[in-house]
Image (cartoon, grey):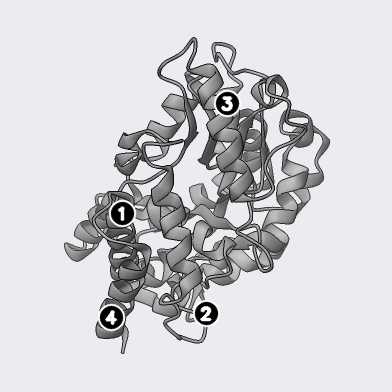
């Protein structure tokens, strides 16, 4: 399934039946804690050299009770895509640093472009009630310095005015600079509008970069990417949700050794280099960010290295363990109700806090 939420449900179904039908699987950065008991420890299959080449942060994320249950395959962070030609056309000398600047630019460009294209929108993103909204909303919240829902020490921090204000900000975009239907958008819905030339800005993952520069793309060579905007001063900050996928092997597989060897091969320097140069997939091996071939294909990778070093914000999956899926579902369900106008940001953070206390305490 395209939706990560649906894919996790499918995996849990296979594992519940201890089915040998799946050998090798792609698992999200937030699933090691949820799936660890069903996965093979892949550390013994890796040479020390390959093991030590991966970003330590991701290896730690994928290690549960001393077992490496997923080999880092590609990493990810939310990014702001912007139309360089349209910013120039409307007199802007660079992309927005703050959300308030994005709102103003998006409205101005949208108004101007609508003269010839009634389907044009200022900003597209992911508003559907699914894991992708947890990523988007955590970016808004963290950019306002509103915490990470549940802090690493287990404190439930969601009920604060900054988090509430960030959700209200996003709700104000709907029907104004963002299409009314954005409340049901996933990644590909946003990319469809953007790559059709019908949006000035888009929040998406790095995979959309190579697709946008395909030979048949109407926006080829007309866009760039930067970290997502900051919330208001004095404590606004860039926030890009850490994503990414790992290769894992089911312990119910009839072909554990063969599957593990495929996983090792697919996550190697050589394999990641091919995926980076041909598909803009962000490597989990630090040395590839200074590889001349990779940088020639993806000049923006150099800048992203800094995002992973400092700006990327992790979802609270490690601290909440196998309850993360429920935590995220509570969060994205309540935030989606703010976007659709059913409740305010303040009502949402109070409701999320109450439900998380019932779940976690």
Q: Which residue is mark 3?
A: 109
**Quadrant where the image shows the C terminus:** bottom left
What residue is drawn where x is 72% and y is 42%?
A: 301
What whole-number distance in Å separates the C-alpha atoms at marks 4 and 1?
Answer: 17 Å
Q: Which mark is residue 354?
A: 4
- Tell me what residue is drawn at x 39 percent, y 76 percent: 321
Counting residues from the N terminus, which is met first, the one under dot 4 or under dot 1?
1
| 76 lies left or right of 16 | right
- Tell which tag, 2 or 4, sits nearer the viewer: 4
Determine which quarter of the picture holds residue 239.
bottom right
- Frontmost of labels 2 and 3 is 3
Q: CA distance from mark 1 to mark 3?
A: 26 Å
Q: Residue at point 73% right, 25% down? A: 91
Q: CA distance from mark 1 to mark 2?
A: 37 Å
Q: Nearer the viewer, mark 1 or mark 3?
A: 3
The residue at the point 55 percent across, 48 percent down is 78
- Residue 167 coordinates in the image, percent (x, y): 42, 58
* Marks 2/4: CA–CA distance: 34 Å
Q: Which one is in front in this view, the residue at disc 4 or the one at disc 3? A: 3
Q: Left or right? Give the position of 324 relative to 74.
A: left
| Residue at numbered disc 2 | 66
| First reached walking from the N terminus: tag 2 or tag 3 | 2
Q: Position of residue 353 (x, y in %)?
A: 33, 78
Q: Secondary structure at mark 3?
A: helix
Name the residue that disc number 1 marks: 336
Which mark sits nearer the N-terminus, 4 or 3? 3
Of mark 1 and mark 3, the one earlier in the sequence is 3
Q: Quadrant of residue 306?
A: bottom right
Comes first in the chain, label 1 or label 2:
2
- Marks 4 and 3, Cα distance to the nearest angstrom? 41 Å
């Amino acid at each position: 399934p395209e939706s990560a939420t649906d894919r996790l449900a499918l995996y849990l179904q296979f594992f519940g039946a201890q089915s040998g039908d799946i050998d090798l699987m792609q698992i999200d950065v937030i699933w090691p804690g949820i799936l660890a008991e069903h996965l093979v420890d892949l550390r013994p299959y890796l040479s020390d050299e390959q093991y030590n080449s991966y970003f330590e942060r991701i290896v730690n994320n994928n290690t549960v009770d001393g077992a490496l249950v997923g080999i880092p395959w590609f990493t990810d962070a939310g990014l702001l895509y912007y139309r360089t030609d349209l910013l120039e056309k409307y007199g802007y000398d660079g992309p927005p640093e703050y959300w308030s600047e994005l709102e103003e630019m998006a409205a101005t460009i949208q108004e101007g472009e609508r003269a010839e294209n009634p389907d044009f929108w200022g900003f597209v993103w992911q508003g559907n009630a699914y894991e992708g909204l947890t990523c988007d909303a955590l970016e808004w919240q963290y950019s306002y310095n509103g915490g990470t829902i549940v802090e690493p020490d287990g404190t439930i921090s969601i009920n604060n005015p900054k988090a509430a204000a960030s959700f209200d900000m996003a709700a104000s975009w709907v029907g104004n600079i963002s299409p009314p239907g954005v409340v049901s958008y996933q990644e590909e819905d946003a990319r469809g509008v953007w790559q059709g030339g019908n949006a000035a800005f888009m929040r998406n993952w790095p995979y959309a970069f190579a697709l946008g520069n395909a030979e048949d793309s109407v926006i080829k060579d007309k866009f760039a990417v930067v970290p997502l905007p900051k919330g208001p001063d004095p404590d606004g900050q860039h926030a890009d949700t850490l994503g990414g996928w790992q290769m894992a092997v089911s312990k119910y597989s009839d072909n554990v050794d063969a599957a593990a060897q495929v996983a090792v091969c697919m996550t190697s320097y050589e394999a990641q280099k091919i995926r980076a140069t041909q598909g803009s997939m962000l490597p989990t091996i630090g040395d590839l960010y200074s590889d001349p071939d990779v940088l020639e294909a993806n000049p923006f990778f150099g800048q992203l290295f800094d995002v992973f070093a400092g700006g990327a914000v992790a979802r609270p999956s490690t601290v909440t363990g196998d309850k993360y899926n429920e935590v995220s579902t509570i969060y994205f369900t309540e935030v989606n109700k703010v976007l659709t106008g059913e409740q305010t940001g303040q009502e949402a953070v109070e409701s999320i806090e109450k439900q998380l206390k019932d779940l976690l305490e």
